[in-house]
Image (spheres, rainbow, N blue to C red):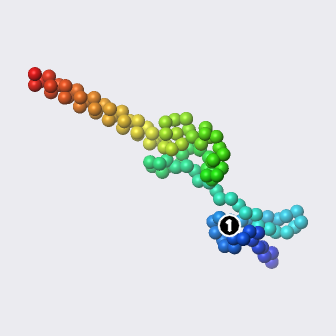
């Protein structure tokens, strides 16, 4: 028969913030040890994929981390995945190319009118 264990804190409900595990003390007693919540891996803001190279930590732990360990050395690093960054760069390039083509067509039409 297993021992009955009691909570060691005031919160007496089995909630997500009150997770615990059983541990045996050197005196042979079984007690609850409270476990911390697991951090989530940062996700891409566009497509929702997990971002590689970033730690899965709780916000409080992220606060004490240095800037290089929270980002990736790339444009939008730590915010968008490589795939979405590539799409953004290509889209911006094509939009600029489109503007150049429109300007060239306008200039050509001006030439034909004269």
Tell me which residue sits at (76%, 63%) in the image: 33
**Residue 92, picture quadrant:** top left
| 26 or 61: nearer the viewer | 61
Horizontal and vertical percent for residue 102? Answer: 23, 31
Q: Quadrant of residue 93?
A: top left
Q: Which quarter of the picture shows residue 101?
A: top left
User: Number of marks in the image?
Assistant: 1
- Image coordinates of residue 40 in percent, x first then y, are 59, 53
Image location of residue 98, percent across then percent down? 28, 33
Q: Quadrant of the N terminus?
A: bottom right
Residue placed under numbered mark 1 in the picture:
18
Residue projecting furthest to the left:
114
What is the crowding at mark 1: few (fewer than 14 residues within 10 Å), some, or many (at least 20)? some
Name the residue: 20% across, 28% down: 105
Q: Secondary structure at mark 1?
A: helix
Is 23 rendered above or below residue 47?
Answer: below
| Residue 88 on image: x %, y % | 40, 39
- Residue drawn at (66%, 71%), measured in percent from left and top? 14
Is residue 74 positioned above or below 112 on the image?
below
Q: Answer left or right for 63 relative to 112.
A: right
Position of the C terminus, as image quadrant, is top left
Using the image, determine if residue 96 lies above or below residue 50.
above
């Amino acid at each position: 028969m297993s021992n009955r264990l009691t909570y060691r804190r005031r919160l007496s409900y089995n909630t997500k913030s009150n997770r615990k595990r059983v541990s045996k003390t050197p005196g042979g007693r079984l007690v609850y040890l409270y476990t911390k919540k697991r951090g989530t891996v940062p996700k891409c803001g566009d497509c929702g994929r997990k971002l590689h190279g970033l730690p899965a930590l709780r916000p409080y732990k992220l606060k004490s981390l240095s800037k290089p360990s929270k980002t990736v050395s790339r444009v939008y690093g730590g915010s968008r995945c490589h795939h979405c960054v590539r799409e953004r760069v290509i889209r911006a390039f094509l939009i600029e190319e489109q503007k150049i083509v429109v300007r060239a067509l306008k200039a050509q039409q001006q030439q034909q009118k004269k």
